[in-house]
Amino acid sequence: MMSGSGIIQRKDLYNIWEQTHFDKILPYKEFIFDMLIHLDILSEQRRYDNDTGSRLKVENFFVPCMLILRNETSFMTCVCTPEKAVRLAFSFKGTIIPPALPNRLISACLSMWTVKTYEGKQLLFSGFIGLSFDMAHDIVVCVEGNKILLYIVHKTSNGLIVPDIATGIKETMFTTLERISEFYQSAVHASPNSQKIPFHVEYSCSRLECFITEEAASTTDEWICDKHKLLHTKEKWNIWNQNQKKIQCEENCQGLSEDALDQKPTDIELQRFVSPCDVTTVHDLAIHLGMTFQEWEDLRDNYDRIEIVKCRILVNWRDRYKGKFRDIAKALSNMNCNLHMLCRVKRVRIERCQSREEYMDFIPTDEILDELAQVIGVVSFQLGIELGLSITSLDIIQHDNGRDLVAQCKAILFKWRKDQIVRPTIEVLHNALVNVGKGSQCLEEIIKSKGVKKYIPEEEKDEVEKKGKEKTFLKKMNPFKKKK
Ligand SMILES: [Zn+2]
Ligand SMILES: [Zn+2]
């Protein structure tokens, strides 16, 4: 049964250890169980309490090494295609990777992101995992020969992948894999310090087959791949190596790709494009795109805030004319505007914090959301879009709550947490606040004053006290501290 799903419960394992030839283990069963988690051989399937935001008692544990089903879904042929995905490889020396490595990597991924469901199946198979990063981006990690492959998949086109997100995921994977292989080597060899990192990064060609090493890619301007004879210029690799503070395009930015121009912009993309524009530009653009002066005026009458009008007029245009990025590009060039204004749809602000607090993985409590709703103010609509709510649901919220801004904010935050399109963590909320220009200070202050409650169910309390000593011991000998 377990070999199908790779899922086991704590009591199942204890039952196995009741057998006579495990009698040496049994007295230490809790310690050994915790050790298996610590070594990423078992991985917690996390669940959270919606009211308190704290972790619920974990029922299920994932045992990646027991997962033998192979991925037979059509995800790789239908969704993760060369048109929608980019790929890199962590390439190991030798012909095969010790299976412990990818298994631990998959465990680590499970603790960071939500497993994606596709055609009713969880994308969790032997040496293969699919994860949801946000509304637009998915992640695939799989093993092939001596490579661990990392795909970033966009909902519509790889030309619209946000480079900051791709770079962030690559760095997280790299660090995790480095930590895992350091530990693995220290377990195999006596002195871990003498070892180098046993893998290097390789980028894939645009057909997702050929490879060039990161080192070679950084020193050559042009690369023609072996199998397809396709020319790749060095700008192609920028997506994996974003400089965080950049607000403008790179010197040789090519703008949106042909494929990206053919896509319909999403609400979030329209908002990212439109929010730095002044009112006159947006008004003129809307007229160029075929909207009427009257429609603009009507929106102005209906919405108090101009920020909503700016976004709303383009959303209405897209929905009525099946508008594409290409139409906006054409209108901008007729207006003699800089076409690189469109590159903003691929730019997000990501604040990298040196020491990541553990509460970033928590789901915000009622109390935190209530407090936050008081201080969000006029950016509630933008925040709603950034959190992935649909324009229709934002309209309903606005209609239901009249001009009560706090009530609107509250409704938006609670709906986001309830919908759970991606795991609604404090980190997601934090990033959204940063991206609408509100900043995360307000959230941090609320957390500081209210605290993040740790909810412990009654029956677990005794256990926790008893285990206090073991926990300290585990911490002391921690061979690789989990990245926080
Ligand atoms: Zn190729
Ligand atoms: Zn540009």
Image (cartoon, rainbow, N blue to C red):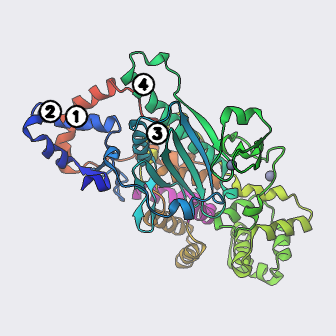
Q: Residues within 10 Å of mark 2 (few under 14, many from 20)?
A: some
On residue 25, the disc is: 2
The picture places residue 324, in percent across and down from the top left corner, at 74, 71
User: Which residue corresponds to the image point at 83% horizontal and 70% vertical from the top-left?
Assistant: 285
Q: Is residue 380 magenta?
A: yes
The magenta segment is: 364-388
Tell me the distance, in whole angstroms, between the alpha carbons under discs 2 and 4: 26 Å
Question: Does ligand 1 reach within 8 Å of label 2's beta carbon?
Answer: no
Q: Which residue is mark 1?
A: 32
SS assignment at label 4: helix
User: Which residue corresponds to the image point at 42% horizontal and 42% vertical from the top-left?
Assistant: 108
Mark 2 and mark 4 lie on one chain; the one further toward the N terminus is 2
On residue 357, the disc is: 3
Tell me the distance, in whole angstroms, between the alpha carbons under discs 1 and 4: 21 Å
Q: Nearer the viewer, mark 1 or mark 4?
A: 4
Q: Quadrant of the N terminus?
A: bottom left
